[in-house]
Amino acid sequence: MRLTTGHYVFLGLFAITQCVVIFLLFTLTGVNYYRMKRIHNLINGAFLMMLGSMFIWRRVTTALNHLDPDHITPARLRWRTICLQDVARASLLIMLVLSQFSMVFYFVFLGAEPHILAQISLVGLAAYLHVIVFLVIAESVHFVSTVSLKYGVFESLNRYIVNNRHTYTFLSLCCAILFILGGLYTTITDPVYTRVTIPLKKLQHGELRVALLSDLHIGPTVGQKRMEKIARLTNELNPDVIAIAGDLADGYVRDFAAAANPLCSLKAKYGVYFATGNHEYMHGNVEEWFTYLENCNITILHNSYKRFVTSKADRICMAGADDLYAAKAHFPGHAMHPERAVSGCELNDTVIMLAHQPNAAKLMLSHPLVSEKLDLILSGHTHGGQMYLFVPIIYLANAFARGLYYHEASGAYVYVSAGVNYFGPPIKMFGACEIIDIVLKPSA
């Protein structure tokens, strides 16, 4: 493709913007740093998505043109094919445009309930991601078959694949639509209970029931009604402890206070506890959220702990550390200090640590002075992948991906929740919007 003057102007503006933003990133701190980082990510994402949109448009429209290439359809019926092509092109264009601007809705139309444009746009983003992944797979297969055909390898099979390229384009679209519909079903239905029993050596006299909530992501697609449902389902468990393991909201208190209000109705015998996730530092002012949660009688575990004795005389120490990336936010007084979080926990206490990221859990378990006290670490962050497309990535990028793990060297357990909600698009794998119902019991 020959580059025009317009292309050079666009690339020049993009390069200048990159230089300005990178300079600002070196000078800003705290919330302003992450706000600029979000803008930087938006610019880079928009550029990459434009390239992806061009690829999708070219492949799909080319396939549409081959629906009736030789005008085999009778003339009196040909309008149906033309109409189908026009409707398909219009639908594709709407999806590409909406997905391109989806991240804008983290800044506008914010309130107690999701705005319809935000929901449609972010579903469009999920559709975009699925379409481009399936198209890349289809094009990769086509490329391999083309090369194989030149060398006479499996000629009949590869010739069939090469000659039916447009069929596989439509198959890619169908797969994307099915995955999107399945993901929408998961997020419009109630979160599921995931029940797990964990034996702990230091627990001597009775069971302790812990409800784990992580990744609530109150924001453009998660509003008050969804949170009311989550609070009701959590309270119905009648837990002894409720643990909120980070990523509470994707914005400021001023925008999402009403949406977060159902958190004030959470009830547990020995309290509700919260430790930060990375999104508290990326999308809002963490100190404002601390104040908000404290007004809801939720205990903030800011590199701190709280001890209590159960009615059956078991001694419990709830600990929580700031998120692994808190230090990178340059927010004064915020960084992960697990040794400080367990400093007041006794060796014979049952210690439950809230650490949002599984990689933070790994660091804690490798810290001798911390790991010797730990019995259970509760994490989230991974969303279990959220969409099937990303499952391989979360297993590669995280020390623990989802579910229950046992660390033999320390004797501690790690539980990673897929989260009760989702980030961005209201699309999630089947059964992956979960409230974790944990029963801790004395080991035999």
Image (spheres, helix red, strand yellow):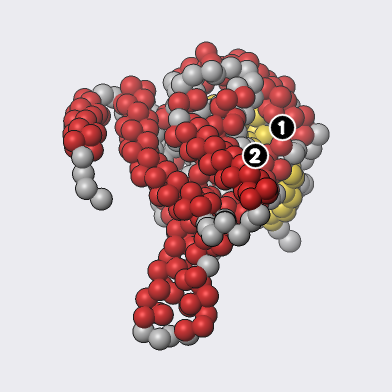
Q: How far apart are the alpha carbons under marks 1 and 2?
A: 8 Å
| Residue at horizontal 37 percent and vertical 40 percent from the top | 50
| Residue at horizontal 44 percent and vertical 62 percent from the top | 139
Q: Which residue is mark 2?
A: 420
Q: Amino acid at mark 2?
A: Val
Name which of mark 1 and mark 2 comes first in the sequence: 1
Q: Which residue is mark 1?
A: 230
Q: Amino acid at mark 1?
A: Ile
Helix, strand or loop at label 2? It is loop
Q: Tell whether 441 sits left or right of 82.
A: right
Q: Is residue 131 above or below residue 91?
A: below
Residue at the limit of the structure toward the front, as seen here = 75
Contact, mark 1 vs mark 2 (Cβ under 8 Å): yes
Q: Is residue 408 above or below residue 86?
A: below
Mark 2 crowdedness (10 Å alpha carbons): few <14, some 14-19, many ≥20: many
Q: Tell whether 77 sits left or right of 375.
A: right
Helix, strand or loop at label 1? It is helix
Residue 338 appears in view: yes
Q: Is residue 101 above or below residue 126?
A: above
Location of residue 67 in the rendering, given as x and y in whole percent from the top left corner = 57, 56
Report the front residue among 215 and 176.
176
Mark 1 crowdedness (10 Å alpha carbons): few <14, some 14-19, many ≥20: many
